[in-house]
Image (cartoon, grey):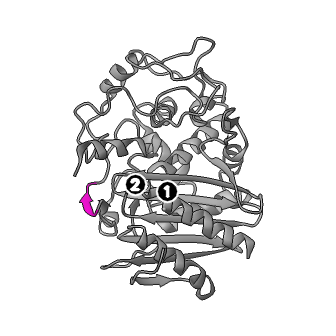
Amino acid sequence: MDRRRLLGTAAVAAGVGLLPGRAMAAGDGLAAQVRPYLDRALAAGAPSAVFGVIRGGRRYVAGASQEGPVPDGRTVFQLGSIGKTLTATALARAVGASRVRLSTPLSLPPGFTVPRGETRRITLRDLATHSSGLPRLPANLLAGADPYNPYAHYTLEDLAAGLSQTSLDNEPGTAYTYSNLGFGLLGQALAFDGVDAMLRRQVAAPLGLSDTTTTLRPDMASRKVIGHMAGEAVPDWRDRVLSGAGTSMYSTADDMLRYLDAQLRPERSPLRDAIELTQRHHFTDPSTGLRLGLGWHFGALSDGRTVTWHNGGTSGFSTCAAFERKSGTAVVILVNTYSDATRAFDALVFALLDELVGS
């Protein structure tokens, strides 16, 4: 497998026809609507795929596979950059507790040189809206990296060295530049050298997301599918430093539906205020008009309704979650492959959501 192509996927954490496949589903009526999208996911190269849907206050899960076991709501996948929205929720909780403000400048312990713009410093809001001006990846991440596991070797010492070599692509707060480095630093700013425990304590545990974690427990390992790229099995990503970007997070369709239900009905969630803050509009890119909350991106369905979404991927997995709050509808897909056609899986989520909202 080409090393350059593999290393290029480090920038992700962060789409016809029918194929024979074995499927299982909950909800007979919805199964007929979801099944064609499962077939299209398999046609796009997914060894296996699972959709989770919320509609009318009910949750549905359907899975399909080319061969072998059919994934269900408890099957474990790597989540990728959807994990950024958990980090953004942790930030929103810290704001609600008056520990920080969105305007608080990024601060790290001594020895970590934080790049700054000519006019002002990077704020936590900038990090959470990809408007910090930071590059997508640390300057020294890929040098000597394992192409199958590009974050695994990276240490806090490496981060300190990389930051000293980093300059901003744009002035903070002026343009959208998607940055795993930025969200990784946001996690470290909130809980230096303790990001994973902070995300479990502040977000996953209160929402009941028992399988949404960077720590693969033995019972989760027995339920996890193997990731693939270009038809070859690849290892899971490991990340001890920039995990606030979602680079090493695991989850399941069941957990993602719990999470999306909290997004649709935050008034029923213990994290109501934090969730509402993440879904508020915080930045618009002046060149593209792209609108962002904290972590979440905003788009539009065919009828003009606002869709809130985030996708994700590692070298072996692709994911996407989207919801339309007024209709109470949400869709998530988890597949165990990364490919150049990843955006095709995103397109399936948006198309299914559009169909469900419009029907």
**In-image side of 188 versus 275 (left or right):** left
Q: Residue at x 22, y 33 (%)?
A: 144
Q: Are marks 1 and 2 in contact (CB under 8 Å)?
A: no
Q: Quadrant of the C terminus?
A: bottom right
Name the residue furthest front: 16
- Label 1 belongs to which residue? 343
Circle number at residue 340: 2
**In-image side of 119 versus 265 (left or right):** left
**In-image side of 90 versus 72 (left or right):** right
* Percent x, y of residue 304: 77, 58
Q: Residue at x 26, y 56 (%)?
A: 234
**In-image side of 297 versus 25 (left or right):** right
Q: Residue at x 34, y 52 (%)?
A: 315
Crowdedness near tag 1: few (<14), some (14–19) or many (≥20) residues, C-alpha within 10 Å:
some
Q: CA distance from mark 1 to mark 2?
A: 8 Å
Q: Main secondary structure of the magenta part?
A: strand
Which type of secondary structure does the marked residue at label 1 adopt?
A: helix
* Percent x, y of residue 335: 42, 65
The residue range painted magenta reads: 231-235
Q: Residue at x 63, y 24 (%)?
A: 104
Q: Tell me the kind of residue under disc 2.
A: Asp
Q: Is residue 146 magenta?
A: no
Name the residue furthest top: 118
